Image (cartoon, rainbow, N blue to C red):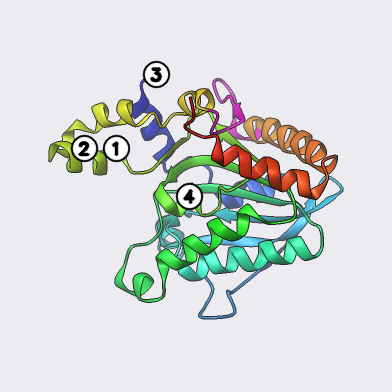
């Protein structure tokens, strides 16, 4: 399967988004709202619940399953208040020693004028900085599209897992083709060059695990993902906090080294 086919699969409107994984994996989930500065952002669902018997904080990007919900969720493109809500919940998780699980599925942060006026770039930068030193385990899962800084703002983690048909990139293939060749029709070529598939990112050491999807229902994929997250949380729980932070720092410092 070529890279652009993976992109098409990641964008499939029938592909489950954040809410599906929360409903399928997390029990006694209580959604928490608002960034305490401006408003609530429907593109990000955040709250607390249990993964088996482990209390966790869950933050998930949600695109919506029909037209009305997609409008409500802004098609999964978070605004600054969404990222600030996520950070508020992550700091709360740190205070109460709860691991953080992030589900990522967005073409990118919302780039409207209002979002820029409210500090979109700053909100993303604050998340990157704070997540690097968050004193609790962080597991991020790319379930569909992982687009640009909008995805990275929930991806500074001890482990990153990708579903097989998800993609994770600095820019969309169409955007890349438009910039490099002034022709968005060359998106296929751009997708190959961007190395945005799960297999590519695993080879580069950017992600730690691929959850295979072939011949599986989404329920089965979710079950496999749950097992993997539990194993990684168990592993993180045995690591002293200071070493966890050092390992997280080194993970990102080593990306791109030969």
- In the picture, measured across the screen, residue 50 lies left or right of residue 41, that is right
**Boundaries of the magenta span:** 205-219
Mark 4 and mark 3: span between their CA atoms? 24 Å
Instruction: Looking at the picture, tell me which residue is in the foreground, 97 or 26.
Output: 97
Residue 151 numbered tag: 4
Which numbered disc, 4 or 3, marks the residue closer to the eye? 4
Outermost residue to the left: 182
Which image quarter: residue 219? top right
Contact check, label 2 and label 1, Cβ < 8 Å: yes
Instruction: Looking at the picture, tell me which residue is in the foreground, 213 or 174.
Output: 174
Q: As displayed, is residue 84 above or below residue 161?
A: below
Residue 177 numbered tag: 2
Mark 1 and mark 4: span between their CA atoms? 16 Å
Circle 3 is placed at which residue position? 1
The residue positioned 41% from the left and 76% from the top of the image is 118
Instruction: Give the prevailing secondary structure in the magenta stretch.
Output: loop
């Amino acid at each position: 399967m070529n890279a652009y086919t993976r992109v098409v699969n990641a964008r499939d409107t029938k592909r489950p988004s954040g809410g599906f994984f929360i409903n399928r994996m997390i029990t006694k989930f209580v959604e928490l709202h608002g960034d305490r500065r401006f408003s609530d952002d429907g593109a990000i669902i955040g709250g607390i619940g249990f993964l088996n018997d482990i209390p966790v904080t869950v933050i998930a990007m949600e695109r919506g399953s029909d037209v009305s919900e997609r409008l409500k969720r802004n098609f999964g493109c978070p605004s600054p208040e969404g990222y600030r809500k996520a950070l508020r919940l992550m700091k709360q998780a740190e205070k109460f020693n709860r691991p953080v699980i992030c589900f990522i599925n967005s073409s990118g942060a919302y780039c409207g004028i209002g979002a820029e006026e409210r500090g979109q770039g700053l909100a993303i930068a604050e998340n990157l900085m704070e997540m690097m030193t968050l004193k609790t385990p962080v597991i991020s899962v790319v379930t569909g599209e992982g687009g640009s800084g909008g995805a990275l703002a929930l991806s500074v983690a001890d482990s990153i897992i990708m579903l097989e048909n998800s993609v994770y990139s600095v820019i969309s293939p169409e955007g890349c083709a438009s910039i490099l060749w002034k022709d968005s029709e060359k998106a296929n070529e751009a997708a190959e060059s961007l190395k945005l598939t799960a297999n590519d990112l695993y080879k580069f050491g950017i992600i730690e695990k691929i959850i295979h999807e072939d011949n599986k229902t989404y329920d089965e994929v979710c079950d496999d993902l749950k097992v993997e997250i539990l194993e990684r949380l168990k592993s993180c729980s045995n690591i002293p906090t200071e070493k966890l932070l050092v390992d997280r720092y080194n993970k990102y410092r080593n990306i791109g080294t030969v």
